[in-house]
Amino acid sequence: MKIKRALLSVSDKKDITKLAAFLHENGVEIISTGGTMKAIKDAGIPVTYVSDVTGFPEIMDGRVKTLNPKIHGAILGVRSNPEHMAQMKEHGITPIDLVVPAMVRASAKNFRDVVIITNPERYGKLMDMLKKDGDIDLKTRKSLAMEAFKHTSEYDAMITGYLQKQLEK
């Protein structure tokens, strides 16, 4: 399987342990945060705490946990760019190939190298494709990236509407 390392950090824990178990069984290193890590660990699945990767603790009630070059560089590094790969090696950054669904925009931006999933309903199709082909094809990667950007734009619109109502009071 081409996916070697995954970052799982979700608010909706639906089927996350099923996905984590599949990834672990297929040799994927799992990195996670707070509640997601606890759910994965409680299911008996090995998981690496994001703070062990970054060397920095989760702070501000978990609001700051993945904002670190060891995570961003691992997601945004373009694997076909020798300069990116050299910089990653120089700074001890190991690529992350799958993100569910933290760091959504960064992951979607680098869809050729990183698979982003924002919807638990997509886990089954992802697992099926990985079982069958050992990787995720480019069309699916683009579709997942588009879905991720749609997800963030809808979230942004919801926040905009909320703030607009607050200003009208």
Image (cartoon, helix red, strand yellow):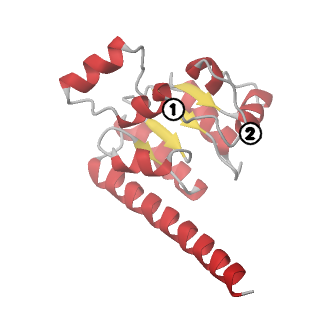
Res 118 seen here:
yes
* Callout in the foreground (2, 1): 2
Q: Secondary structure at mark 2?
A: loop
Contact, CB < 8 Å: mark 2 with mark 1?
no
Q: Residue at x 70, y 50 (%)?
A: 11
- In depth, the one of 17 and 115 nearer the eye is 115
Q: Amino acid at mark 1?
A: Ala
* The quarter of the displayed image where residue 51 is located: top right
Left/right of residue 1 with respect to residue 86 in the rendered view: right
The circle on residue 134 is none
Graded by Cα atoms within 10 Å as few (under 14), some (14 to 19) or many (20 or more), the crowding at tag 1 reads many
Cα distance in 3D space between marks 2 and 1: 24 Å
* The quarter of the displayed image where residue 139 is located: bottom left
100, above or below 73, in the image: below
- In depth, the one of 64 and 6 nearer the eye is 64
Q: Residue at x 56, y 57 (%)?
A: 119
Q: Position of residue 102 (x, y in %)?
A: 56, 45
Mark 2 or 1, nearer chain start: 1
Graded by Cα atoms within 10 Å as few (under 14), some (14 to 19) or many (20 or more), the crowding at tag 2 reads few
Left/right of residue 77 with respect to residue 63 in the rendered view: left
Q: Secondary structure at mark 1?
A: strand
Q: Position of residue 107 (x, y in %)?
A: 42, 45
* The quarter of the displayed image where residue 56 is located: top right
The circle on residue 6 is 1
Task: Report which residue position mark 2 lands on.
Answer: 60
Q: Position of residue 8 (x, y in %)?
A: 59, 38
